[in-house]
Image (cartoon, helix red, strand yellow):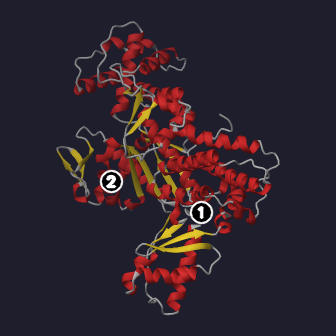
Amino acid sequence: MKNILRERIDEVLATLKADNVLPQAVSANYQIDIPKNIAHGDYSSNIALLLAKPCSKPPRVIAETMRDMLLRDATFEEVVVAGPGFLNFKISSRSLFTIVGEILVRKTDFGRSMIGASKKVQIEFVSANPTGPLHVGHGRGAALGSALSSIYTACGFEVVKEYYVNDAGRQMDILAASVYLRMKESTGRSSSYPSLCYQGDYVRQIAENYLKSSSLAIEIEEFAFDKVELKGDSDSDLDNLIGEIKEVLGLEAFAQLKAHAASVITDRIREDLENFRVDFEEWYSEQKMHDFGMIDSVLSNLNSKGHTYVRDKATWFRSAALGDEKDRVLVRENGAKTYFAADVAYHSDKFSRGFARLVNIWGADHHGYVARVRAALTALGCGEQRLEIILVQFASLIRNNEPVAMSTRSGEFVTLRELVDEVGVDAARFFYLMRRSDQHLEFDLDLAVSKSNENPVFYVQYAHARICSILESSEEYDSAIWEAELGDLLSEASERKIAVLLARYPEVVISAMKSNEPHQITQYLREVAQEFHSYYNGHKILIEDIRLRSARLSLICCIRQVLVNGLQLLDISAPRSM
């Protein structure tokens, strides 16, 4: 309907220019809004206010001229000049309720568009190191990335969801050392365990299962557990310990142990994400970039362009000259490449794959990382403006109005799997998506499982189930039959408000895509549910008047369809009964 209004207004402007009532060159980036007070009409525009200065005319004079011309169109029942020159529109019932026929015809396609013109978009999210299970913090990024992928797809983009597997570097060496030491414990040898190693019980499980594995390439004796002893508990002590383990095992066996541990954890991450209704087209390995020389190639490229230098035997990137707060190390003095070097190569490869837009979803703790990545892309000439980075704030759990401890000294923490087991996938995804991603989220566990109107996901799903129940009680109703004249029967203010609200849905989807804000969908669905519940409580739908009953059934059928479409974008179920 907003598009129709814009067409009508533009037609009037063109006529006024042709008649020399308004200057030919005048234009305005005007808005069409929905008034908060329904008494002010269905829609409102500030067009006359914006035209007043360039036309040297009072805004009310321009508004009154436009009003008189617009009223000649059957689209409008009433056009009122309000305040200093706002135009308030009341749409004719027949025009307003054309949205009902459109939704009944388009069904699941309602709200979808081709604004993306099949352009390729890559959305990289979660990308947690395969050093432990996913925790509740990862869940928020998972829900956000998954929902955004669906929203982009609904807008006509070709979306690739990607998980970057950080399966190389020091943290993976620490994981392998942690498993090695737990294996040593499991064979009955006393062992002190560094506090800087991974503490979770999952490490012990990996160690014990590895010892039992028939695929073990070397004999237990060859692990030479007795030759390795912890001599301290600092970072340097841990690095020395890792070096000793590599020496007694040999680099090949150490790499095998590391790959096994990473594989077990990655498989569990995949499983947890699948249970959370999140899947990926690509699982991109950092280790493969090392193996294929991709990082060396990118570093050589940066060096050839004069963006690197050597200091204290380390290779540095001149990122400060490109907007970062300081220069960054690419290769340490011992020859080890930094995580930043791998990230530069990864993003360079992303751009080489021909994506029109790249969306990275990172934890808020990566805030300081943004400038250096953008600087590297600028240095490589990748066109970093195509990269959008979304920072996700942490989510805390609340139970009985008290914060839930997120971790313990043993290294255990509240996992995504535990959260889903407690509240269910639907509630977890909806609650994660209720706020802007850059706002801290308090996840109320008690509210998430309650069957009350205060629980937002229950409130929305119950609206859908309630409509299903009504429609099932109306066997003679045929949703395929909608006549324009039925719109004339829907004269209640609440019915008009619902029609305007339903017509907003495609606009909300596009807005959520452009701003990378799926919470706009959850807020909209709550608004739709609220309007339905209010309408249901105030009006009888299954009345004796057959035509009015049919009109009202069609209206709530459209509400149901919009609820389904919105919930599907968030990958949340729409139960028919509750």
Residue matched to label 2: 300
Q: CA distance from mark 2 to mark 1?
A: 41 Å
**Frontmost residue, 407 versus 433:** 433
| Left-right relation of 97 to 401 | right
- Residue at x-position 65% and y-position 34%: 578
Is 529 located above or below residue 268 in the figure? below
- Residue at x-position 75% and y-position 65%: 485
Query: Which of the marked residues, 2 or 1, is nearer the chain's N terminus?
Result: 1
Q: Amino acid at mark 2?
A: Ser
What is the total number of numbered labels drawn onto the structure image?
Answer: 2
Q: Is residue 284 in view from this perspective?
A: no
Please provide percent x and percent y for residue 55: 40, 86
Q: Quarter of the image containing the N terminus? A: bottom right
Disc 2 versus disc 1: nearer the observer: 1
Please provide percent x and percent y for residue 261: 45, 26
- Residue at x-position 64% and y-position 51%: 559
**Frontmost residue, 92 versus 241:** 92
| Left-right relation of 379 to 63 | left
Please provide percent x and percent y for residue 91: 60, 69
Dot 1 falls on a residue whose secondary structure is loop
Q: Which mark is residue 114?
A: 1
Q: Which mark is residue 516?
A: none
